[in-house]
Image: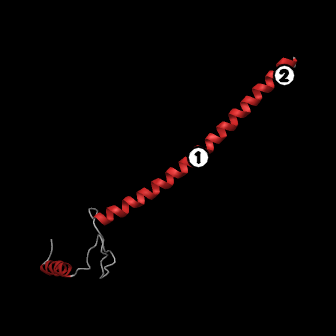
Amino acid sequence: MMSQKDVEEWAAMVAQMQDDKSYHPKHNKKGNKTLPNRRGPNDLEEQNERLKFKNETLHKYNQKITEEVIELRKIAEDYKSLKKQLQQSVKQFRNKGVL
């Protein structure tokens, strides 16, 4: 149960919070007087910046994957040429009667 004094203090604190623009415990924990001018999620500039960032990130990832694919294709070509050389060597040994 709250006493009359507690109720009056509570009312004064609520009135002070309503008057004081810097008191926003969720967004301004330190009680700074200047609140950041944050744009909301529906702001077109914010969406544009977010999409540009995603686009750059995806392009970098796509470029990395493309380079890896090119490297793997080169390795596959080397493997095929080595396989062909090995088959030719085996044929030569078989023709000579070594194997």
Alpha carbon distance from label 1 to label 2: 37 Å
Residue visible at 47% across and 54% down in the picture: 59
Q: Quadrant of the N terminus?
A: bottom left
Residue identifier under label 2: 93
Residue identifier under label 1: 68
Q: Is residue 86 above or below residue 60?
A: above
Residue 20 image-quadrant placement: bottom left
- Mark sitting on residue 12: none
Tag 1 near tag 2, CB within 8 Å: no
Residue 90 in the figure: left or right of residue 1: right
Residue 70 in the figure: left or right of residue 3: right
Residue 42 in the figure: left or right of residue 97: left
Residue visible at 45% across and 53% down in the picture: 58
Of mark 1 and mark 2, the one earlier in the sequence is 1
Crowdedness of circle 2 by 10 Å Cα count: few (<14), some, many (20+)? few
Q: Of the residues shown, which amino acid type is indicated by label 2?
A: Phe
Crowdedness of circle 1 by 10 Å Cα count: few (<14), some, many (20+)? few
Local SS, label 1? helix
Residue visible at 37% across and 64% down in the picture: 49
Residue 16 image-quadrant placement: bottom left
Q: In terms of depth relative to the viewer, which is nearer, 4 or 16?
A: 16
Q: Of the residues shown, which amino acid type is indicated by label 1?
A: Glu
Residue 23 image-quadrant placement: bottom left
Residue 56 in the image: state x and y as whole percent: 45, 58
Q: Is residue 2 above or below residue 75?
A: below
